[in-house]
Amino acid sequence: MADYIKLDEVFGENVFNDAAMQQRLPKKIYTKLREVIESGGELDTETADVIAHEMKEWAMEKGATHYTHWFQPLTGFTAEKHDSFLSTPLESGKALMSFSGKELIKGEPDASSFPSGGLRATFEARGYTAWDCTSPAFVRQDAAGATLCIPTAFCSYNGEALDEKTPLLRSMQALNIQAKRLLGLFGREVKKVTAYVGAEQEYFVVNAEKFKKRKDLIYCGRTLFGAMPPKGQDLNDHYFGTIRQRIAGFMKDVNYELWRMGVPAKTQHNENAPAQHELAPIYTKANVAVDHNQLVMQTLKRVASAHGFKCILHEKPFAGVNGSGKHNNWSLTTDDGVNLLDPGKTPHDNIQFLLILSCVVKAVDRHAGLLRESAANPGNDLRLGADEAPPAIISIFLGEQLEDVVEQLISTGTATRSKKGGVLYTGVNSLPELYKDATDRNRTSPFAFTGNKFEFRMVGSQDSIAAANIVLNTIIAEAFCEACDELETAESFDTALHEVIRRNFSEHSRVIFNGNGYAKAWKEEAARRGLPNLPTMVSAIPELTKPESVEMFERFGVFTRNELVSRAAVKYDVFAKTRSIEAKTMINMARKQIIPAVIRYTKTLAEDINQLKAAGFDEVSVQTTLLHQINRYLTESFNALVSLEEKDQAAADIEDVEKLAAYYINTVVPAMDALRRPVDQLEMLVDKAAWPMPSYGDLMFEV
Ligand code: ADP
Ligand code: MG
C-alpha cells in the first residue's frame, strides 16, 4: 500500500455503488434497479441476469474469483460460503465464467448448523439467502484473494427469519410507513423516511505474541485471571492522547481497507483504558450501517493480525479496567434530506418535532425492557452498571433546553420559550468567541439526545447493532401509529395534537433523567419511579416474549411469536455456552498452567530455605513467610478449582436452556469468581519469571 492515501480515489473503489451501477448498467436496467432499491418490489429474471453479469465483470476486473452471499445468522457474526465464477461444462479445457441473476438474488446454504432456536428441526436443512439490494455489493480483498460479497437476508424454508437483517428490514419498512403517516398530518408528503445509524466502535489492541500466550484470550476473547497492574487508567493520560506510531500505522491500514469497501471511517482516537481505541464511521441507512459495522469489526481484526497485533472486541477484556461498548446513534431522515430529530433553534415552537420527541419518550418508556434486552449479551453483563458504562436501567437524557420545554408542556399544556446557548467565556481574549450549545452532554445516560439524534449507549462492543435498531424502529413505529390513529380522526387537529404531546410527555416523563446515571442514588430513584432494572442478560431475555412485545412485533410485521420464542431460546443457549466455555477455560488454565507453575515455584522456595539453612543461615523468615502465604492461596485455588469442576460437570444434567442459563449465573459464575480471587493473589506473590502467562501490565502497556 502507498504511504499516502488519495482518499478521493480510494473511497468506494471496491463497491458496486450507484456510480458503478450507472456506469455499467444499461439505462433501462439501472432505472428498474433504482426503483426497487427506493420503493421495494421484485426484480424480474431478465433484469437480474443483466445486473449479475455486469456485477461479475466489474468484480473480475478487481481480481475477484469468487462470490459469496454474505449474511448475518444469529451467531452475531457474518457467514459466507464462497463459489467461484467457474461454470460447467469445462470440456474445452477453457474456463467459462458465469454468474446468473438467480445466483445473485437467491442462495441456498445448508441452514442446519446455524442457530434457529427450535424454528427448524436439524433435518429440515433448507435455508435461503436473498439479496438486500439496498446494501451495495462489494469486493473484499484478503488472503483468499478477492471475493464479491453480496449482502443478503437469511430465511428458513417457511420464510421465518434466521438472521438479523430480515427483521431489521421489516422494522425499517414499518417505521417508514408510520413516519410518512405522521408527516402527512402536517401536510408533508415524502417518498420515504429512513432510520439513519452511526455506530462508534470501541476496541483494544494488544501484542499478538502475548495474546497467544493466554488461553482465556484465545478461547473467550477476555481474560479470566489477572491481577491489576500498578497503573491502570488512573491518570486518564491515554484518553485522546497522541496515538502511538505503530497503532497509527494500523489505523491507517484499517481506514484504507474500509474506505475501499465504502465504509466511511471518520473519527479515530485513543479511548479511556490503556490500549483502548475507538473508530466511528459517518452515519448511513440503518441496514447499511449494520453491514458497515460488521465490516469494521472484521477489518479491525484482520488488519491487526497483519500488524502483529490482536484486536479484542470483547465488552470486558480486563476486569477493573474500562470495557468497550458501541454507541448506536440513531435518527430519522426523509428522502429529501430533512432530519426529523432536528429541533431547530427554538424547539418550543416546532410542533412536529415535539410530537416526534414525545413519541420517542413514550416508546422508550413503554418498551424499556425490550430495548435493554437488545443490548444483552454475555460480555455486556460484565460491563453495564460498572463505572464506565450506563447502568442496566433505561432512561432518557434530553438536556436542559428540551427538558425545560417538556416541563412547560406538562405543566401548562403549551411551551412558549426555549433556553438559549449563549457565549462561552474562556477568559482569553485572543480566542474566538464560541457559541455554546443550549445543552451540555451527559455521558452517563444510556439513551441521550445529542442535538439531532439519539445515542443509545448500551450496545456491547462485539455485538451486532441490528437488534438495537430493530427494537428502536419498531417501538417508535408503534408510538407514531398510535398518535396517527388518534390525530387522523380528531375533530380539531390542533387541540388533539397538543393533547397527544402533553399526554405522551406527562405519562412517560418518569423515563427522563438528566442526572448522573453512574451514581448509586439513581438506582434507588429509578426503583421509586418504577423503571425496570434488568441487570443481567438472563433477566432481560423474557422481555422478548412478553405479551405486549409479541403483540407489537406481530402487528408491525417484524417478528412472529415463533421467531421471538426462537430468538429467546438462542439467547439462553448462547449465554450458557459462553459461560461454559469460560468455566472450562479457567479449569484448563488453572490445572495445566497456573497450579503446576506455583507448585514449581514453592519447590524452588523450599529448596532455597533448605539450602540456606544447610549453609548455616538461621534467618530464612522471608522465604518461609512467602512460602506459607503462597501455600495458603495455592490450597484455596485448588479447592476452588475442584469445586468449579464439579459445578461445571453438573450442568450437563440440565436440559432446559432457560434453567441452564440460570444455573450458570447462580452457581457456576460464583465458583469462577472463587477460583479467580486466590489465583490473582498468587500472581502478585509469585516471581514474574515463574508466572505462566503475560500479565495485565504486559498486555496493556507493552503493545
Ligand atoms: P461522540 O463520540 O462525540 O459522540 P463521534 O464523532 O465519535 O461523536 O460519533 C458520532 C457518531 O454519530 C458518528 O458515527 C456520526 O456519523 C453519527 N451521527 C452523526 N449525526 C447523526 C445522525 N443524524 N443520525 C445518526 N447518526 C449520526
Ligand atoms: Mg465517539
Image: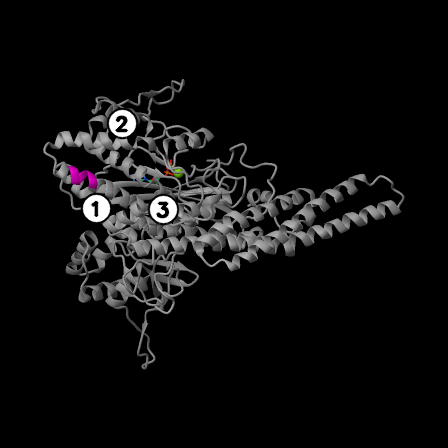
> Residue 435 colored magenta?
no
- Residue at image x 56%, y 55%? 648
- Residue that carries the numbered disc 1 in the rendered image: 176
Q: Is residue 90 visible?
A: yes
Residue drawn at point x = 40 percent, y = 17 percent: 427
Classify 10 Å Cα crowding around label 3: few (below 14), some (14-19), many (20 and above): many
Which segment did they paint magenta?
Answer: 482-486
Gap in Å between the C-alphas at discs 2 and 3?
29 Å
> Helix, strand or loop at disc 2?
helix
Which label lies toward us, 3 or 1? 3
* Horizontal and vertical percent position of residue 487: 15, 37
Q: Nearer the viewer, residue 554 or 354?
A: 554
Q: Do the residues bearing badges 2 and 3 touch, measured as CB atoms within 8 Å?
A: no
- Beta carbon of the mark 1 residue lies under 8 A of ligand 1: no
Which of discs 2 and 3 lies nearer the camera? The answer is 3
Dot 1 or dot 2: first in sequence order is 1
Picture coordinates of residue 464 (x, y %)?
A: 38, 50
Say what amino acid the circle numbered 3 marks: Glu
What is the total number of numbered labels drawn onto the structure image? 3
Asked which secondary structure carries label 1, the reply is helix
Q: Are marks 3 and 1 in contact (CB under 8 Å)?
A: no
Dot in front, 1 or 2: 2
- Residue tagged 2: 406
Mark 2, ligand 1, within 8 Å: the answer is: no
Q: Earlier in the sequence, mark 3 or mark 1?
A: 1
Q: Which residue is mark 3?
A: 543
Q: CA distance from mark 1 to mark 2?
A: 26 Å
Q: Counting other residues with Cα less than 10 Å from the Cα at mark 2, is it few (<14), some (14-19), or many (20 or more)?
A: many
- State which tag comes first along the sequence, 2 or 3: 2
The image quadrant that residue 406 belongs to is: top left
Badge 1 amino acid: Asn
